[in-house]
Amino acid sequence: MNHHQRWGRSNKEEMNETGSGKTLNEKERFSGWTYFRMAYGFVGLVALLLNYLFMLNGVHHDFGPLQGSYRLMRLFTNQTNLLVVAWSLYSCLKTPERREGLYLPRGLRGGLLVYITLAMAVFHVYLRQGYSLTPPLFAVSLLTHYLVPLAYLTDWLLTEPRGCYRWKYLWSWTLYPVGYWLVTMIIGSETGEYPYPFLNWQEQGIISVLQKSAGAGVAVILLGAVIISLNRIMPSTKD
């Protein structure tokens, strides 16, 4: 048995079967899902860049480049959008043989889904009514809080390989939100500034902040449990 019989056919044989100059791998790589990921990754990246420009020259503020970057990236929503954008664009570069598991932890996509869904839920429940936005900022807010999260959720539901999640992922997924909360509270205690009003214990009171923070922590665990359960029980599919 020769090499190609053992490990697969040559590119020439694949070209003959497909009738084109592209191999099967290239055809599979540039599938509809690849273009979908390119689309929402690009939209998310544009939304973040626009948000940054508004930070530099906004209606209520005029930050410099460094302060504008800090103001942009201190928001949990923008951090999670950036992570989703990075994953979506990265996934477009890998071939079917080079699975993301070779380079990234298997549960990473599920963790990102927890974070981006949490950002969408917190905004919708706690923050949506408290912001007065100009039309451009309102459009960017819709992209980062709804369009990108829902696009990523759809992608995950229909393409994530089934039965590969373990319950131990649940605890590792809590590390990032807990770390974010700790860093935010430490910086806020020193500067008096918080990215979200419900984290400002100096104005809201420590009991209120702890209650809302505990609620967010429970939401992370529940979301993670739902995502793991779905991955384990949903019918199998291919990425």
Image (tube, helix red, strand yellow):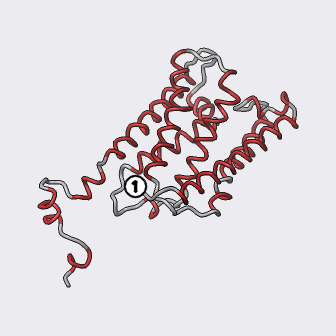
Name above or below for residue 69 compared with residue 164. Answer: above
Measuring from the top left, give residue 202's x and y in whole percent. Answer: 85, 31
Measuring from the top left, give residue 160's x and y in whole percent. Answer: 46, 54
Name above or below for residue 119 compared with residue 227. Answer: above
What residue do we see at 74% from left, 47% from top?
218
Measuring from the top left, give residue 20's x and y in whole percent. Answer: 13, 53
Left or right: 196 as drawn, with respect to 35: right
What residue do we see at 20% from left, 70% from top?
9
Residue 205 image-quadrant placement: top right
Looking at the rendered image, the quarter that the C terminus falls into is bottom left
User: 128 and 65: which one is in front?
Assistant: 128
Figure disc tally: 1
Residue, disc 1: 239
Left or right: 164 as drawn, with respect to 19: right
What residue do we see at 56% from left, 61% from top?
165
Measuring from the top left, give residue 91's x and y in whole percent. Answer: 41, 51
What residue do we see at 44% from left, 46% from top?
88
